[in-house]
Image: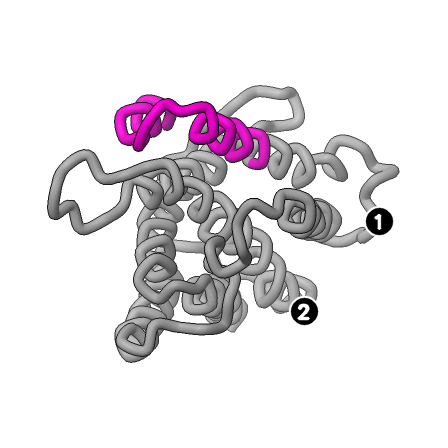
Amino acid sequence: MVMPIVFFTLKNTRLETLKILLIFSSFFIARIVLLYLPLEFDILNFVNGKWNWSGKIYAICGSLIFLGVYRKFELKEYYLTLKQDSGFKKKGTLIILIIFLIYCVKYYFESPTNWNLETILYQLTMPGIDEEIAYRGIMLGLLTKILRPPFKNLFFHPAIIVTTLLFGLVHGFQLNDNYELNFKLYPFFNTLLLGFIWGWMTLKSGSILFALISHNLGNVSNKLIRMG
């Protein structure tokens, strides 16, 4: 679904560019497989809980292995650095607060839940660490090397659009126990909006740090409010 955008914005069709595109696609698919392995095979589920801890840990380990094996680019080129663009710090902090308020407002559209410590610990750690390293780190970093805006003065990079669409689609499409594929609009548009903001923040700041903090803070605050 995103390949037309990718091919329309490719810098060139040289072999090296196509290799990076193949690596990007392979990483995306491998991460999805790792994420869902413990849901399909109980023997691989080493953390028994409400949430998919095992899958997230596998996915994070997969990202780390990728970074260790594929050494073509430095970590900072994947935005995996604590160093921030000094001119973006105030804007980044303000955006984090705005996203926090968005998550709080979401409370009125979602059902309240009972207190659950596992949920708080999971939302405070796993989603942001896994998804920001993968989407706003590795995948965004790879695409910025091979894609370019199709029009001059375009204020956002096509790499943001592609990773944002993928981020929204993997949350919108859901496979049930009967292997039937369903699509839910609310998770899609919710993650589409946030994914775009986090991608933009990452490119502007030069690091996934703001996106990671915003991601986990938003997730856990929404859960806490609903449990209140």
Q: Quadrant of the N terminus?
A: top left
SS state under label 2: helix
Residue 5 drawn in magenta: yes
Q: Earlier in the sequence, mark 1 or mark 2?
A: 1
Q: In the drawing, what numbered circle is on residue 117?
A: 2
Q: How many labels sit on residues?
A: 2
Q: Amino acid at mark 1?
A: Phe
Q: Amino acid at mark 2?
A: Leu
Instruction: Judge the density around disc 2: few (<14), some (14-19), many (≥20) Cα neighbours within 10 Å.
Output: few
Q: Is residue 14 above or below residue 128?
A: above
The outermost residue toward the right is 43
- For the point 38% across and 59% down, the residue is 202
Between marks 1 and 2 in the image, the one whose residue lies nearer the viewer: 1
Residue 107 drawn in magenta: no
- For the point 65% across and 44% down, the residue is 66
SS state under label 1: loop
Q: Which residues are magenta?
A: 1-27
Residues 143 and 59: in front is 143
- For the point 48% across and 43% down, the residue is 139
Alpha carbon of mark 1 to alpha carbon of mark 2: how far?
Answer: 19 Å
The location of residue 102, given as percent across then percent down, is 32, 64
